[in-house]
């Protein structure tokens, strides 16, 4: 069941569609449910490297969570989680990694009504640590929890989640000062030397 839902979510690319319709450029780290590189560590490097090469303004990694059901109480674990890396250089003056995570938490929760478990900034996940722009990893729901799984199977929940992600990105873009010039979007960034 989990692989089918993950494939369906990848095929739909709902957040990408909403953002593109709003005139926001989107670069995906993958176009389908296949890893860019079929080796876990190299796959992660390919993802954050692509974002850095594209000079992305923001990075959002979207996931469906799972808990190993051999552990007692695992099936009861549910909700959304957001990860960021708090010790990362600020690309935009006054716009912290934590602020980006808060925006995404508030936006997605408001859109889909999902229970929010926690937000962590001290986990050293490669895609949020190695990107040169503000980055979050969103675990949208637990596929191993019956209620969350039912939500993930709901087109309405997936649509609302994508809407919340797109809305959060748009709020973050406003805060970092994205502006349009000659039909192109720009933002001023701090450059690490």
Image (spheres, rainbow, N blue to C red):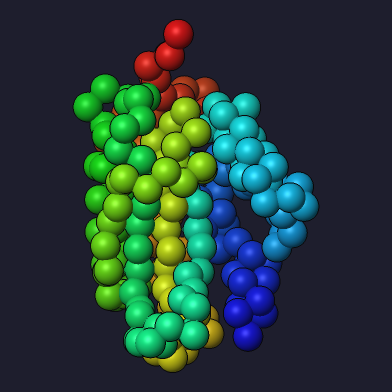
**Residue 57 in the figure: left or right of residue 45:** left
Q: Quadrant of residue 11?
A: bottom right
Residue located 25% across and 42% down the image: 99
Residue 134 location (% of width, % of height): 39, 36
Residue located 55% across and 49% down the image: 20
**Residue 67 in the figure: left or right of residue 43:** left
Image height check: is 56 above or below 123?
above
Image height check: is 178 above or below 152?
above
Q: Quadrant of residue 12?
A: bottom right
Image height check: is 27 above or below 150?
above
Report if residue 5 is visible in the image.
yes
Image height check: is 175 above or below 76?
above
Q: Nearer the viewer, residue 123 or 155?
A: 123
Residue 187 location (% of width, % of height): 41, 24
Residue 182 location (% of width, % of height): 52, 23
Q: Nearer the viewer, residue 102 or 40?
A: 40
The residue furthest top is 193
Q: Which quadrant would the C terminus be assigned to in this image?
A: top left
Report if residue 159 is visible in the image.
no
**Residue 167 in the figure: left or right of residue 14:** left
Residue located 27% across and 34% down the image: 96
Q: Which quadrant would the N terminus be assigned to in this image?
A: bottom right
Residue 22 location (% of width, % of height): 48, 48
């Amino acid at each position: 069941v989990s692989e089918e839902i993950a494939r369906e979510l990848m095929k739909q690319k709902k957040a990408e569609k909403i953002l593109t319709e709003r005139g926001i450029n989107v670069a995906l780290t993958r176009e389908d449910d296949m890893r860019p590189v079929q080796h876990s560590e190299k796959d992660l490097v390919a993802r954050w490297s692509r974002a850095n090469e594209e000079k992305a303004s923001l990075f959002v990694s979207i996931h469906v969570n799972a808990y190993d059901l051999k552990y007692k109480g695992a099936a009861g674990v549910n909700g959304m989680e957001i990860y960021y890396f708090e010790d990362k250089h600020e690309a935009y003056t006054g716009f912290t990694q934590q602020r980006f995570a808060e925006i995404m938490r508030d936006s997605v929760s408001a859109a889909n009504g999902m229970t929010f478990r926690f937000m962590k900034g001290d986990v050293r996940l490669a895609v949020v640590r190695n990107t040169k722009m503000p980055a979050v990893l969103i675990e949208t729901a637990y596929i191993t929890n019956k209620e969350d799984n039912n939500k993930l199977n709901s087109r309405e929940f997936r649509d609302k989640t994508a809407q919340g992600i797109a809305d959060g990105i748009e709020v973050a873009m406003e805060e970092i000062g994205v502006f349009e010039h000659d039909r192109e979007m720009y933002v001023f960034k701090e450059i690490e030397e």
